[in-house]
Image (cartoon, rainbow, N blue to C red):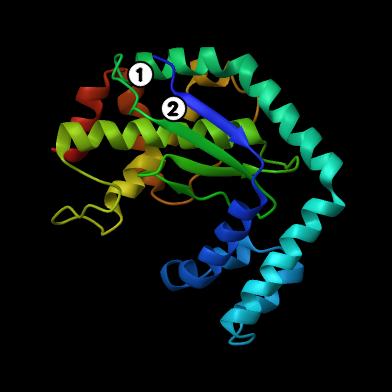
Amino acid sequence: MKPNLKLEINIQADVDNCIYNVKNQSKVVPDFLDKFLPLNLQHLLGGEPSSIKRTRIIQEYTEHIYSANADSIEGDVGDTKECWEKVEDKFYKLVNGVFQDYSWPDGEYVGTASIFRMYPRNIKNKTFYFPAQKTRLGSLGIIAHEMLHFIFFDFIKNKYGLGEKSKIKGKSPEYVWQVSETFNNVIENWEPYKEIFSEEPRPYAGCKKMLEVMEQQWKEKQDINFFLDQWFL
């Protein structure tokens, strides 16, 4: 099965993305906005300006960047779409094999280009962001990373009754998220995956020991049910 993925430029969605993260994410991950905002918007991290002024600044800044770089952004996003079309069938075939032909969740998946420096996702809405302009990390790896998350979280919801923010007794409050990120790194470091994507995967900085154990488990037995049972049962 091949999911219905749309890659788009949506300036207002990117504005709303920034407004939401400036308002909310600093409360959850203190250094998130340092990485998310470009240097010339770092002043928004202080107590001033007011939320109304901050919203106006973000709106005007985002619209200006898209206007000033319209040709390059349209060109880069167009290149991303073309490059994704060349690899998507191989990627979905690999993922379908990993998840033993488990069906992708129904509905449209939407990837929106972003001028900001972090690319959040919404598992419930099947939306995520990817770079509007060429970056060191590369857009294809980010798209594939988020698509992996969508099928992973649907799989564990149906098999274990777990969601992205579920808590497991005796484990870190972020355990499920940590397992998901580490699992992605295992797949991204796997040779069949690396044959599809030439970009270096985004490393997950946490849980080095978890990654070492997972990679060994996956190397020994590539069975998603047996593999995830080790972490969720």
Badge 1 marks a residue whose secondary structure is helix
Task: Please state the horizontal and vertical placement of residue 24, each as a whole percent of the image.
Answer: 46, 69
Residue at 68% x, 22% y: name it: 83
Task: Please state the horizontal and vertical placement of residue 49, each as a whole percent of the image.
Answer: 64, 85
Q: Amino acid at mark 2?
A: Ile
- Pick the front one: 205 or 45: 45
Residue 200 seen by the camera? no
| Tag in front: 2 or 1 | 1
Quadrant of the image occupied by residue 9:
top right
Q: Which residue is mark 1?
A: 98
Badge 2 marks a residue whose secondary structure is helix
- In the rendered structure, are the residues bearing label 2 and label 1 in contact, judged by CB atoms less than 8 Å apart? yes
Whichever of callouts 2 and 1 sits on the residue coming sooner in the sequence is 1
Task: Residue 187: give its label.
Answer: 2
Q: Is residue 127 left or right of residue 113?
A: left
Residue at 48% x, 46% y: name it: 204
Q: Is residue 29 left or right of residue 7?
A: left
